Image (spheres, rainbow, N blue to C red):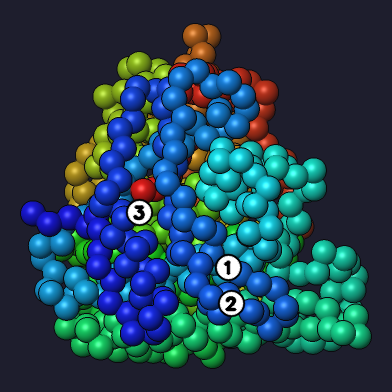
Amino acid sequence: MPVISGFLVISNYNKCNTAALICRYADLNLITMTLKSFLFLSLVWFALPSCKNEQNVLSTGETSKQEQPHDYYKFEGVPIDKMDSLLMQYRLYALETDLSTLTPNEQKMIPILIEAASIVDELFWIQSYGDKNALLKNLNDKEKAFALVNYGPWERLNGNAPLLTDAQKPLGANFYPADMTDKEFEMWPDTNKSSQYTMVRRGKDGKLMAIPYHEFFAEPLKRASFLLEQAAALADDDGLQKYLLLRSKALIIDDFRPSDMAWLDMKSNKIDLVIGPIENYEDQRYGFKTSYEAYVLIKDLEWSRKLEKFKAFLPDLQRGLPVGPAYKTEAPGTDTELNAYDVIQYKGDCNAGSKTIAINLPNDEVVQLEKGTRRLQLKNVMEQKFKEILVPIATELLDTNLMKHVNFGAFFENTMFHEVAHGLGIKNTVNGKGLVRTALKEHYAAIEEGKADILGLYMIDYLASRNEIQGSMEDYITTFFASIFRSVRFGVGSAHGKANMIRFNYLMDQGAIYRNSDGRYGIHFEKFRKSMSSMSALIRTIQGDGNYDKAAALIRDKAVISSQLAADLDKLTKKNIAVDLVFKQ
């Protein structure tokens, strides 16, 4: 049974590019790694060999060039310094999948898509930090490994605390000039300043200027666009071919709506690609700018068929939301799909620090209202996180009587309905403040993630009461609660981390969860279910009202890790339970 492990790349873009990629991917199957007990970590990275005249010169004068190739390295034995401990937060996992269901042409597409994904990985480095090579050149191997997984010198799993630098990470990452003040930004009359697809820089006259992504990153985006055209020429599936051609165009004009529509129209494709500037998590200053990322995916046809029936319930789920009528008047798109995939590449934003296990896209509210969204369950990574991380956490922190309720089925469906919940609720405020995303600014992502978490569990309760899903609510609630511990270890610097701490503290305040004298946590199931509804109503009202101040207060008061919880989480570190995964890909 063929699995993805090494490739011979076909690329006509130029001879240097082809030679580099053959070297890059052919070497992958020469590498084998073994994780030896809990005191072991391996981190891998591969880079394109440098080629004369292949350095990307951006329109702003900033440069992006690939680091030189390195062999893999590993750290074994008792940690001897802080860097060892930080690296050991990650467990190595090889992204592999069965290719036997793919046609020869589809197999040829994969390395081309991986090459395009690698290009946007470099763009995210510039958005999140700046000159990667200037950072890496003065670091030792351990420090480089840390910087590569964090896309910069800050600890993403610790609220972006400085580590390889004395400087705090700018809230606006590298999207804005370091010396720009909020007042200066507010007074600046350019309407493109809040665009999702512009980098803000200073011109020669010192004044602010908004540069569209397709201009700022012109040359690398042209190369990525060309590669998608190459892949489209090999596509056996008409829908996939149309999408790749439209996405190729979108990358060089920053108009993604037509390709988003085409992406939702795809039904029979076995290969999928998510690529472009998508999420706004990295811009914690205003929440405006989207970051480049890419996933290369293989659809799990059997699991996808199992999920097909759930989309029929979306209109009923929207009508039944536990919130006032004014906050659920929007009808969700009816073209929604629920699919399961194996991931073979994470690049850019999605690969920075903690790794996502499910996706709900597109984010474009117009597309969502017209056609719905696609929910992608990243099954191979999800299974690994459940086995390597969630089960050990639950074993350590939960009341032993609850362990019988922790299972992968509940974990999978909790994650799936979290993504479904992103498409429900409301996209426009009820009082004329415009889009919820715009009204809540930098707090939108954390509030939206909190909505999806708690609303997803509400939806499972709804379906379970109608015998549409298997398993008890005790299973779903317990596995959901155990996953909060997993997610809060990502720190409160991320939207997901903030959302999980808000939920944890809210449930504690309501008596829905509690800490026993032995340091293990229990659940009051009846109070938990009541808290689901009340918290859902609270968040949906904040969103519908576009209440920025109330969102800020909720995050300020609840998105905090108490000293007691910090001590409990420290037990997991001492037991060498991984915080997240790092990929061999």
Amino acid type of disc 1?
Lys
Mark 2 and mark 1 lie on one chain; the one further toward the N terminus is: 2
Disc 2 crowd rating (10 Å Cα; few below 14, some 14-19, many 20+) is some
Disc 3 crowd rating (10 Å Cα; few below 14, some 14-19, many 20+) is many
Q: What element carries label 2?
A: strand
x and y percent of residue 378 in the render? Answer: 32, 55
For disc 3, the marked residue is 585
Tell me which residue sits at (26%, 24%) in the image: 404
- CA–CA distance between discs 3 and 2? 24 Å
x and y percent of residue 200 in the render? Answer: 75, 76
Q: Nearest the camera: 354 or 464?
A: 354
The answer to whether residue 300 of the structure is visible from this angle is yes
Amino acid type of disc 3?
Gln
Instruction: Please give left or right for residue 319 compared with residue 305 in the image.
Output: right
Amino acid type of disc 2?
Asn
For disc 2, the marked residue is 56
